[in-house]
Amino acid sequence: MNHEQPIIVGLDIGTTKIAAIAGRKNEYGKLEILGFGRANSNGVKHGQVLNIDETIKAIQVALDNCYASNPNLEISEVYVGIAGHHIKSLQTRGDIVRQNTEDEITRREIDQLIADQYKTYIPAGDQIIDVIPQEFTVDNFQNIPNPIGYGGVKVGANFHIITGDKNAIRNINRAVEKSNLHTKDLVLQPLASAAAVMGQEDLEAGVAIVDIGGGTTDLAVFYEGILKHTAVIPFGGENITNDIKTGLGVLKTQAEQMKVQFGSALSNEAKANAYITIPGLRGMPAKEISVKNLANIIQARMSEIMDFVTYHLKQVGLDNRALNGGIVMTGGGSQLRHLIQLTEYVTGLNARIGFPTEHLAAGHIEELAKPTYSTCIGLILKGYSDYEHNRKQFDKGFLKMEVPDNLRKASVQQEEELLQDSELAQQARVRNRKGMKDFWGKFKDGIIDLFKEEEDHAL
């Protein structure tokens, strides 16, 4: 275990669940999970915190469960995901003419260029969550990934600016702060999920990460190593459950159960003569429900979600097979049967499921490898990127702590045996350093301090 690293906690405040995961990188650059708790979420709709009290209760339950999994943990700061259909993104362009053209371009000048973008005009009621440089130009040279060290008169960049509704952001911060936690940073959920399920090859090949959550479907599109587009589509697994409830006249809990146990995203794949028997309510006769009808309902809503994905890909000109890495689906909703086939049919791109195992150490319990936890694990990775690039202050008195047995698989020797050989270990370290180092490096600090408005202190 690498005790010279901080323990970082991701808090995913979702529509169906709230998850808190504490992790630390081991000596091979992989995440070891030191604490894990989840709770059912109430008070969040379509990814937005509507009822602060209900959300605080759910955060407390998730935290209690996290402490139950590892009583030695101390959690005070968290990286929090943000989604919701109020999230918008826009493209801007910024340039600066340099004072000392004899000198090489410095990090300070690039930081200034990025800081200037926070003055971009956006509609009242919104605020900027993140400014992400895409590619830089120096004088007449284009498509420069990192201009530091270049010489030139004028340096500029195209930027991807992500904005959100001020009240929605304030609600998240209040819920977190009233749970006696401090928000270290707010991170756009599709970017967190992308970090968890994506490798360096995906970034270069070009992929669309589609995170199908309970209340929203989050999209992040990468092409030639650059974040091209982000979007939050206001439909998710809850909408499918509600469609089943309404369409088949059953209770919500029954609808959810049927979706998970018998649901399919392709009605052609459902058996025509198969039925599910649902007990009648209060002496009413039992109901026979056709598996084919169930699949028809799921397919209709899933096709609609994938049509949105196609629409967004068209907007950025990446719909016609330009994405060699295809579509990577993650999130709880990605576990629906036959979803890969439906996605490939609707979008015309190859599809696969993305599991957050890309950066996890071997030997963790199966539960943590589910696509449901991609956002949460991506939030920890964002924290590590901040730590490794000195973007935020971290306590230096790191706790000594081992992975608790309840979060460890029975045999944890696989990775250790593989990496016993010091040469292999050295290679693994180098690989992980190279790996996704640039991923979060492209994304500047969220300006969390803007949210700490005076009136919050008065409350």
Image (tube, rainbow, N blue to C red):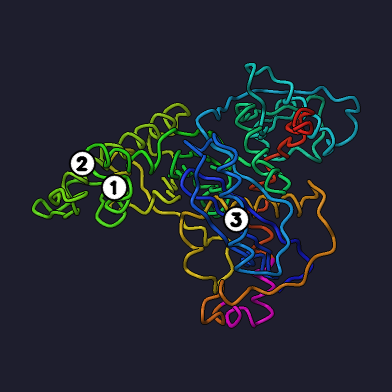
In the picture shown, does residue 381 fall above or below 427?
A: above
Instruction: State which quarter of the image contains the N terminus.
Output: bottom right
Read off the magenta span.
Answer: 415-429
Q: Secondary structure at mark 3?
A: strand
Question: In the rendered structure, are the residues bearing label 1 and label 2 in contact, judged by CB atoms less than 8 Å apart?
Answer: yes
Could you tell me how many numbered marks the image carries? Answer: 3
Q: Secondary structure at mark 2?
A: helix
Which residue is more in the foreground, 325 or 455? 455
Task: Indicate the position of residue 404 as horizontal and vertical percent values.
Answer: 62, 74
* Residue bearing mark 3: 20
Magenta run includes residue 341: no
What amino acid is labelled 2 in the image? Leu
How far separated are the C-alphas under marks 1 and 2? 8 Å
Task: Indicate the position of residue 13 as horizontal and vertical percent values.
Answer: 56, 45
* Residue bearing mark 1: 255
Task: Indicate the position of residue 231 as horizontal and vertical percent values.
Answer: 50, 33
Main secondary-structure element of the magenta-colored stretch: helix
Which residue is more in the foreground, 410 or 99? 410
Q: Residues within 10 Å of mark 1 (few under 14, many from 20)?
A: many
Q: Which mark is residue 271?
A: none
**Sequence-earlier tag: 1 or 2:** 2
What amino acid is labelled 3 in the image? Ala
How far separated are the C-alphas under marks 2 and 3? 35 Å
Task: Indicate the position of residue 3 as horizontal and vertical percent values.
Answer: 77, 70
